[in-house]
Amino acid sequence: MTTTLPLLPARPPADDALPAGAREHLTTTPFGLYVHVPFCATRCGYCDFNTYTSDELGPGANRAEYAGTAIAELRRAAEVLGPDLPTVSTVFVGGGTPTLLPAEDLAAVMAAVRELFPVAPGVEVTTEANPESVTPASLATLRAAGFTRLSLGMQSAAEHVLAVLDRRHTPGRAAQAAREAVAAGFEHVNLDLIYGTPGETDADWAASLDAVLAAPVDHVSAYALIVEDGTRLARRISRGELPMPDDDVLADRYVQADTVLRGAGFDWYEVSNWSRGDAARCRHNELYWANANWWGIGPGAHSHVGGVRWWNVKHPAAYAQRLAAGESPAADREVLEPADRTLETVMLGLRLRDGLPLTALSDAGRLRAADAVARGLLDPGAHEAGRAVLTDRGRLLADAVVRDLTD
Ligand SMILES: C[S@@+](CC[C@H](N)C(=O)[O-])C[C@H]1O[C@@H](n2cnc3c(N)ncnc32)[C@H](O)[C@@H]1O
Ligand code: SF4
């Protein structure tokens, strides 16, 4: 780990240059690219991602030009990181709804990645998609462009739950899209689920899990519904129209998901993620959780290279203007102290099935780890072998355990 990074001003330099310390392990640390696509057809009531419907977008940014703008930032990235460029091991196109763009635009972004960067032979290339925004033809175009993995937002198989979430697709559409992805040759397909939506019953959740198991997918992400400030969902809850998700119900749903998925050959590898075998893990997310290096393209996207973290201006119009003027789209930058990096690695690592070595914890953290073993939150066998690994009960209280061990 680098210990000699100089302190930098908050605003990144105009040419985005990185300090020498941050480049030290550039070509030997796993490197990924994230491409944010900030557009959605409609906004789901629970979502506070940096995404815009046509009505919200305003002038100065348009979808038709977005791929070209993203490619302009990719060129800057290659200039800043060069001449000894890191090899791209994963690409993740997320949103928003990437598949609102024509598949040809996403293919053009991937072609630019290959033109500008060395790309690993087994590169993982994921795009997120809304179930209603892909077709067999668009999936075939994406597959031909080198996309290997599709991540579909399914959320629920219950129609009334989808309605509360403001989702526009029918209950069966996500599984159908997964089948189309497999037919198009995608190697890996993920379905995202949300549990604990107001009005969702145990039977609804069981039906959602059954629907996932009936689909040809090798990865499932299941998230407890988070009521984000400023969303339509938060307003509806504060007006008393909908109840707040209940913590006990959320815990029950998590156990139900884990039991059903485990019974069908899925194993958890991060608190909210299950895969059928290690080869089906999302390597791009693993790269984040290992605190490796990535460049985030797009408005509001975050990047991290060698302890330097920066993020782009949030609005697509401001982002496009900066790049059109040949300026950096970065808004702010911070240089992490080694202690901050260690803390982040611990916070992320504790949520993983592999856990982390006890030596990564502070002295106080190690003492608390022993206590967490006694309380049934950390695995005793792993602890004896020198690692901190959550038990099934520990996963239910993962956030609290992480706080306790990193305080
Ligand atoms: C960018 S979205 C996925 C792609 C696509 N836009 C879609 O919604 O189908 C990423 C995922 O984050 C999850 N998510 C977003 N907001 C959430 C919230 N407030 N609580 C829980 N999960 C959330 C959803 O499962 C969603 O599928
Ligand atoms: S959940 Fe997905 S589709 Fe819905 S608003 Fe958020 S990014 Fe868009």
Image (cartoon, rainbow, N blue to C red):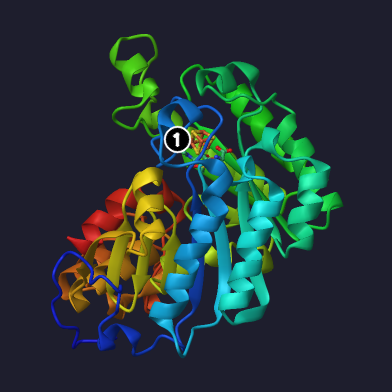
At which x and y percent is residue 355?
Answer: 42, 68
Could you say which is closer to the camera, residue 142 or residue 199?
Answer: 142
Please indicate whether residue 275 sits to the left or right of residue 388 in the image: right
Please indicate whether residue 243 sits to the left or right of residue 214 in the image: left
Mark 1: secondary structure: loop
Could you say which is closer to the camera, residue 196 or residue 120?
Answer: 120
Q: Count all numbered tags in the image, as a single digit.
A: 1
Q: Quadrant of residue 364?
A: bottom left
At x 63%, y 74%, the residue is 114
Q: Is residue 308 visible?
A: yes
At which x and y percent is residue 81?
Answer: 41, 81
What is the quadrant of the N terminus in the image? bottom left
At x 63%, y 23%, the residue is 203
Q: Is residue 216 visible?
A: no
Q: Quadrant of residue 231?
A: top left
Residue hosting label 1:
52
Please indicate whether residue 209 sits to the left or right of residue 253 in the image: right
Could you say which is closer to the camera, residue 206 or residue 174?
Answer: 174
Is 87 placed above or below 169 here? Answer: below
At x 27%, y 88%, the residue is 20
Please indicate whether residue 375 sits to the left or right of residue 58 in the image: left
**Amino acid type at image mark 1:** Tyr
At x 53%, y 27%, the residue is 42
Residue furthest to the right in view is: 183
Classed neighbour count for the residue bearing mark 1: other residues with Cα under 10 Å, few (<14), some (14–19), many (≥20): many
Could you say which is closer to the camera, residue 378 or residue 300?
Answer: 300
At which x and y percent is residue 117?
Answer: 56, 79
Residue furthest to the front in view is: 325
